[in-house]
């Protein structure tokens, strides 16, 4: 991880914590430790404005590790594998999509052996062609090797590294859970009628006491 962070500095602000127990339980498999460190260090975002790594806090379903994309991609690969539509060098049941590119390539973990995730290698398929590329290392090692120029992935653009190596985080405001909409204004007479029906003493006019308004809001949630 140190080699990657020196090559491509992570965002200065910390990433939102991830409940890895929940994530792994939902996926039904353990995840590589290097990926957990990568996700915690960088958060959701894109490397070199091209390589998107799926994240449990992905801001859309297209980049969400726990969203529908990995299963959709595996289903399509299985169709290609069963019918020979496009060559798939690995059993799709042993491929798990971990990212994608702006050009339409996908990055996969080769999940063999399944009970040793820290040994999983990386595969990349060509977006509009039959070629596949296999990297004999972890995801973090793959990113470090590619972004340093040590490894060339044939489907990736030749000018990928012409600009400075960088990581662009997803807009943090999009990570914030949506807040409930404000309660629409309620006529004072409505609250007064409710209060009297429920044994409260409330004046006919003027400001409704805060305690009575709060009691009405608890009894009438938005």
Image: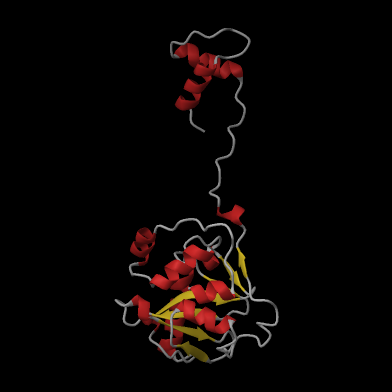
Residue ID at (53%, 80%): 144
Q: Can you tell which quarter of the image residue 20 is in?
A: bottom left
Number of marks present in the image shown: 0
Residue ID at (52%, 14%): 193
Q: Is residue 210 above or below residue 29?
A: above
Q: Can you tell which quarter of the image residue 219 is in?
A: top left
**Residue nearest the viewer, comparing 213 with 53:** 53
Residue 209 image point, x, y percent: 55, 14
Q: Is residue 124 above or below residue 53?
A: below
**Residue nearest the viewer, comparing 25 with 38:** 38
Q: Is residue 131 left or right of residue 114?
A: right
Residue 145 image point, x, y percent: 53, 84
Residue ID at (38%, 86%): 91
Q: Can you tell which quarter of the image residue 47 is in?
A: bottom right
Residue 77 image point, x, y percent: 45, 82
Residue 179 image point, x, y percent: 55, 43
What's the image's color scheme? secondary structure
Which residue is most to the left? 115
């Amino acid at each position: 991880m140190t080699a990657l962070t020196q090559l491509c500095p992570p965002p200065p602000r910390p990433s939102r914590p991830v409940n890895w127990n929940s994530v792994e339980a939902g996926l039904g498999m353990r995840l590589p430790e290097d990926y957990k460190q990568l996700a915690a260090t960088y958060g959701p975002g894109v490397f070199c404005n091209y390589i998107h790594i799926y994240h449990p806090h992905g801001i859309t379903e297209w980049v969400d590790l726990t969203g529908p994309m990995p299963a959709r991609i595996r289903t399509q690969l299985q169709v290609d594998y069963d019918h020979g539509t496009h060559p798939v060098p690995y059993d799709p049941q042993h491929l798990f999509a971990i990212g994608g590119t702006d050009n339409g390539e996908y990055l996969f973990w080769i999940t063999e052996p399944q009970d040793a995730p820290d040994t999983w290698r990386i595969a990349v398929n060509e977006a509009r062609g039959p070629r596949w590329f296999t990297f004999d290392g972890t995801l973090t090692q793959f990113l470090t090797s590619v972004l340093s120029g040590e490894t060339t992935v044939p489907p990736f653009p030749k000018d990928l590294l012409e600009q400075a190596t960088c990581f662009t985080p997803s807009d943090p405001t999009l990570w914030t859970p949506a807040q409930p909409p404000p309660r629409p204004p309620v006529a004072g007479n409505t609250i007064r009628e409710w209060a009297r029906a429920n044994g409260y003493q409330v004046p006919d006019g003027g400001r409704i006491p805060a305690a009575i308004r709060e009691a009405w809001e608890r009894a009438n949630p938005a």
